[in-house]
Image: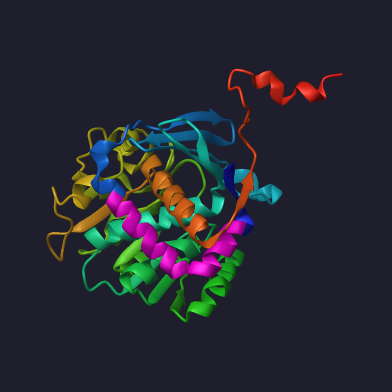
Amino acid sequence: MVRVITVQDISQLLKKVTLKTFFLKLIDQLNSDYSRWGEFQKSPRHATHVPDGVIELMPISDKEYYSFKYVNGHPNNTRQNKQTVIATGQLALVESGYPVLISEMTVLTAIRTAATSAMVSRYLARKNAKTFGIIGCGAQSEFQVLAHHFALDIQEIYYFDTDPHAMEKFAANLKPYRLKMHPCTDGRSIVEKCDIVTTATAQKGRHKIVETDWVKKGCHLNKIGGDTPGKTELEASLLKKCKIVVELLEQTRVEGEIQQVKNSPVYAEIWELATGQKKGRESETEITLFDSVGFAIEDYSVLRLVHRLAEEHHVGHQLDMIPHTPDPKNLFGVIATSRS
């Protein structure tokens, strides 16, 4: 039997453990998994580019589990009332290849992306950071805010989107958390005010959501919107002023902000911070950048956590997804009674 987790199951699980607890457990899981980087078989994701987006497979494994995620990115989907990003994932035992978990990952991808950003912010943001800004109030935005609220005790939020409805939605969803919310009229005012800034836009193409002259000393930037070839959010000259951290350099060179500048210097991959091989922020004045494109180890981490918590709290559905026969060589016997 395989445990299957639906969107409703994720909602039920989060009610049982609370969103804050889940975020903090996931950040710990991510940090633990990144710190054993050498134990994983890794590769950049496999991307199929289509006219209006991209479809990807993201695999990874260690000695115990193999996981993969199917995920898309179609920015124009919102015009048809569909999600820009949807995903499903699977966790399987390496020793037998048998799956133990099949899960929705549209919500989980949003959570793990935000948790990864918050984990890296702990390394790179100034210790006294108090203000968080987000440019782009789409599907990822509330998750980014809450991950930083829970992990870094950020209380003051500045936000902007070119779509007023998205800003209204964003504010309404976060109202129960009693944060100090500041709507802004442009991205510049956010960057100039905030200690930590996340850019989370969806449109394909090379954009300058953040310009170099806006960024003050000591700022930490999480860039999560640029995640495919030809899709960027920052002015290229800004990269030369930043201490840059990435997930997998081989992948980020193709998909991240650093694709804009040939041989752009990168300070570290996340695992080097997690293991202590490299320091995070080293001064109050340096500008730091997490050039995030998403990597499979993050899906592995969230699937492992969901599997563990779902079993503990009896969430999900046990479904017969694998044939079971007295004779493993008699697969046809499973359907023999259905022949005409």
Q: Quadrant of residue 139?
A: bottom right
Front residue of 26 and 326: 326
Task: Tell me which residue sits at (57%, 47%) in the image.
Answer: 3
Q: Is residue 56 left or right of residue 235?
A: right
Front residue of 225 and 105: 105
Query: Which SS type dominates the magenta stretch?
Result: helix
The image's colouring method is rainbow
Query: What is the residue that sits farthest to the right in this orientation?
Result: 340
Find out whether residue 16 is within the magenta segment. yes
Front residue of 300 and 116: 300
Q: Is residue 311 above or below residue 126?
A: above
Front residue of 44 and 209: 44
Q: Horizontal and vertical percent for residue 22? A: 44, 63
Task: Tell me which residue sits at (21%, 67%) in the image.
Answer: 126
Q: Horizontal and vertical percent for residue 287? A: 21, 58
Q: Is residue 254 above or below residue 236?
A: above
Q: Is residue 31 visible?
A: yes
Query: What is the residue that sits farthest to the front in this orientation?
Result: 326
Q: Horizontal and vertical percent for residue 229? A: 42, 34
Q: Is residue 188 visible?
A: no
What segment carries the magenta color? 9-32
Identify the image quadrant of the N terminus.
Answer: top right
Q: Horizontal and vertical percent for residue 16? A: 53, 68
Q: Is residue 264 left or right of residue 163?
A: left
Q: Quadrant of residue 153?
A: bottom left
Find out whether residue 207 is within the magenta segment. no
Q: Is residue 154 above or below residue 249?
A: below
Total labels: the figure holds 0
Q: Is residue 144 above or below residue 182?
A: above
Identify the image quadrant of the C terminus.
Answer: top right
Task: Tell me which residue sits at (42%, 42%) in the image.
Answer: 227
